[in-house]
Image (spheres, rainbow, N blue to C red):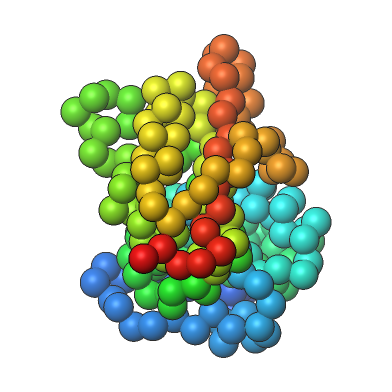
Amino acid sequence: MSARHEDAHAALWPTHGLLISDGDRTPLDLDELFGRDNPKVLEIGFGMGDTLAATAQSDPGRDYLGIEVHTPGIGNLLALLQDQDLSHVRVARGDAMQLVHRLAPGRLDAIHVFFPDPWPKARHHKRRLIQPVNVALLRDRLRPGGILHCATDWPDYAEAMAETLDADPGLEPVDRNRAGRPETKFERRGAGAGRPITDLRYRRHPAPAA
């Protein structure tokens, strides 16, 4: 990390950081983590954190929890929180699904999965985040009516995402709009390479699936 990132990490990690350990199933109280009971949004894989910070800045009524494994990205997001005084953002380091296991059902207002690793080689597709078992768990953590918003610049992954999300019995498609999502670095890179950008927004059924 740069000196700026290291300074922000030292200053903010004790109060704004959360380390996720593999196998830890201790329930995570999000209201306690944020110190208030506002609606909660989870962003999985926030990269350098620019998009999460911009979204949170324009949406002060909801609390944002981002999770990433990339150390420079974590440092950069913490620096953005410090620069912009974003007190309603928390930063987790570790495996996203390990974190999701620790959340109570129906706890999240929205989940954002923007430009996850596409694992383009066929033999690696099983490593993709948007798989039926993961989607079922993500959906369970959404409140009824909550939104799962995915985006990718890989057409075959977009098709696989849509098939998986359509097949989940507790989700219904909303639209394919970006819905105010800020442009990301990965999006600009994909568009520059000529790849189409696909947004997929799904809602958890108002009544829990049987």
Query: Which quadrant holds the C terminus?
Result: bottom left
Q: Position of residue 53 (x, y in %)?
A: 69, 55
Residue 17 visible within the image: no
Q: Position of residue 30 (x, y in %)?
A: 54, 79
Q: Residue 188: percent from the left, percent from the top?
A: 63, 26
Which one is in front, 38 or 136?
Answer: 136
Q: Is residue 154 left or right of residue 80?
A: left
The total of numbered circles placed on residues is 0
At x 55%, y 38%, the residue is: 200
117 in relation to 11, above or below: above
Q: Is residue 58 left or right of residue 121?
A: right
**Name of the residue lying farthest toward the left:** 123
In the rendered view, tell whether residue 209 sits above or below residue 29: above
Res 208 quadrant in image: bottom left
- Which of the 4 image quarters holds residue 93? bottom left
* Residue at point 52%, 26% (across, down): 153
Q: Nearer the viewer, residue 78 or 184?
A: 184
Q: Farthest residue in the top direction? A: 194
Name the side, left or right, on which 107 lies relative to 169. right
Taking depth in this image into account, of 208 and 56 the one nearest to the observer is: 208
Q: Residue at the location (67% across, 36% down)?
A: 177
> Could one spot residue 38 in this view of the protein?
yes
Residue 141, percent across and down? 45, 67
Q: Quadrant of residue 41?
A: bottom right
Q: Residue at position x 74%, y 51% from top? A: 54
